[in-house]
Image (cartoon, grey):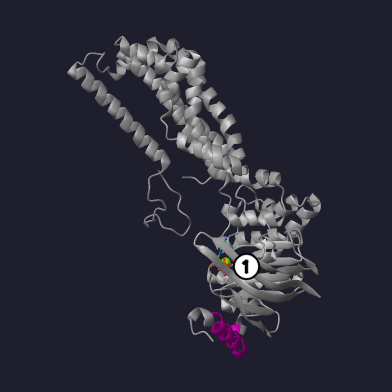
Amino acid sequence: MDKIRIDSLSKTYASKVGRVRALENINLTIGHNEFVTLVGPSGCGKSTLLKVIGALIKPSRGRIIFDEAPLLKPTADVGIVFQEPVLLLWRTVLDNVLLPAEILRLDKAKAKKRAMALLKLVGLEGFETRHPDELSGGMQQRVALCRALIHDPSVLLMDEPFAALDPMTREELGFELLRIWDVEKKTVVFVTHSIPEAILLADRVVAMSPRPGAIARILDIDLARPRTLDMQFTDKFKSYSDEIRAVIHRRAGGSAP
Amino acid sequence: MTIELPAGIADDEEVEELTSSPSPARTYLTATLTLMALIGAWEICARWANLPAWLLPSPSAIADAVADWRWELLQHFLVTFSETLLGFGLAIVVSIPLAVAIVYSPILQMTIYPILLALQSMPKVAIAPLFALWIGFGMMPKILVVFLVSFFPIIVATERGLTSVPPPLMELIRSLSASPLQTFIKIRFPTAMPQIFTGFKIAITLSVIGAVIGEFVGAQSGLGYLILLASSQSRTPLAFGALLCLTVMSILLYYAVELIERLVVPWAKKT
Ligand SMILES: Nc1ncnc2c1ncn2[C@@H]1O[C@H](COP(=O)(O)OP(=O)(O)O)[C@@H](O)[C@H]1O
Ligand SMILES: [Mg+2]
């Protein structure tokens, strides 16, 4: 069964300098518990697509089918992680994780138990009473991930969540995400502009090209799980990466078909 | 001063200091000593030049005046202090809810707020004579001048603070379908707090000035009144004494606000 169906979706922004065509006729089906990465150069509409999937902005044309029903307003069945952790500085780590549970008025005791378990899962056991400014960037992003998972949504939307981190932390968190995804089965839509990251994490890579944002190619990633860093050096990985690189720059580079 | 060295570091080893700027304690000490030296120099110069006290009194003459007039000074201090606090409090009570209303109401944003921003550049203290004309010479016109000067920094800071929530955070909150009240209480207001306090700190300093100007225009009490009276009678040491009291009041109020800030918004960025 499909989790999310994106149906001939287009998005045009009206801005001061005129209309910006951000997305053009996107069709994509995302399966239950599938890990999909959206990869493409900056400005190709990845964030826009993610926001439309989260019903944070309305499409100009087309629609999103979520659990077999048209998605008209934001649903709590979605957890979101952005590039910036945007934690609340006045709250402890634990209370930051609990924010969605408070807003959704979930059972307090249960939510707290789940928050502690999630923090343990990301290796932040013992940091519950710390404040965000006492944590490193990677730790803050782990807290943001726990916050996105606290209400146990079935879909996780991530917009370049590791892009602001140093390369080592970035790799580390990527594998951690996969480990969590193994424990807490979720449908993940993960935006990145790093091709290796996109391949290493995904079941399927959706390669996008800009002006206007469109799907250039969809690749099934046939690499065994659990994924390892070594896989980057295999021929298969390299051919995926070459293929993606070729299509996402084709229209942008001007050598149009 | 001895510094305990961690094991493994020999006494004669040169240890790189972490901070390049001097410690706050040392800065306080040097500043205090400098101040004392300046006062001493003033005293010596005043005595040596034998200036008349009405022109420039020596620090000791000012100290004498303060000692002689301590009860009167205290009384006037309390008047000015009350005017300042009442005006400042009134400004808080009016401007914060108004800022909230402006942030939440597109109509107010298009009507009232631009007018307020334009009025902000008006020299508010210049209205003081009109207040005296309209309401007389009691405490009320002074309170209103204080209100007026502290109102603008607070409302502007609150408006800025309330609208400074990072867009991704707003999106996160929206994805959870949070109610406007939840958004305000859990996100917007706490986010605005540090900036609101920045507004308070600007406002409290202006408040004291506002009260004094209000008193200059017409009053029977207050430190501003006392300065005016003393200088008109060439009792310069007393005028300086009153000025000293005003300075102390300004500093006290500023640090009181800062102390409250530290207690209420410990997460505010230290500047
Ligand atoms: N709110 C907006 N108003 C106008 N144009 C926008 C807005 N958001 C994004 N855009 C434009 O839409 C295009 C796609 O943006 P975005 O989805 O952020 O791309 P990406 O995340 O891939 O970098 C860009 O050209 C961008 O300038
Ligand atoms: Mg983006």
Tell me which secondary structure the magenta stretch mostly adopts.
Answer: helix
Asked whether B31 falls inside the magenta stretch, the response is no
Q: Is residue A172 visible?
A: no
- Relative horizontal placement of residue B163, taking residue B142 as reference (left or right): right
In the image as oriented, which residue stretches furthest toward the bottom? A235
Residue drawn at the location 67% of the way across and 43% of the way down: B185
Q: Chain of mark 1?
A: A
In the image as oriented, which residue stretches furthest toward the front? A18
Q: Position of residue A249 (x, y in %)?
A: 52, 80
Mark 1 CB near ligand 1 (8 Å cut): yes
Q: Position of residue B188 (x, y in %)?
A: 62, 46
Task: Name the foreground residue: A225 vs B124.
Answer: B124
Residue drawn at the location 18% of the way across and 19% of the way down: B48
Tell me the quadrant of the picture where the N terminus of chain A can be found.
bottom right
Magenta stretch bounds:
A232-249
Task: Name the foreground residue: A3 vs A186.
Answer: A3
Q: Label 1 is placed on what type of residue?
A: Lys
Q: Secondary structure at mark 1?
A: strand
Which residue is labeled 1 in the image?
A11
Q: Position of residue A128 (x, y in %)?
A: 67, 53
What count of labels does the image hold? 1
Task: Name the foreground residue: A46 vs B107.
Answer: B107
Residue B56 position by quadrant: top left
Q: Is residue A150 above or below residue B34?
A: below
Residue drawn at the location 64% of the way across and 80% of the way down: A228
Asked whether A236 falls inside the magenta stretch, the response is yes
Q: Is residue B149 above or below residue A183?
A: above
Residue drawn at the location 69% of the way across and 46% of the way down: B180
Q: Is residue B167 visible?
A: yes
Residue B251 position by quadrant: top left
Q: Quadrant of ligand 1?
A: bottom right
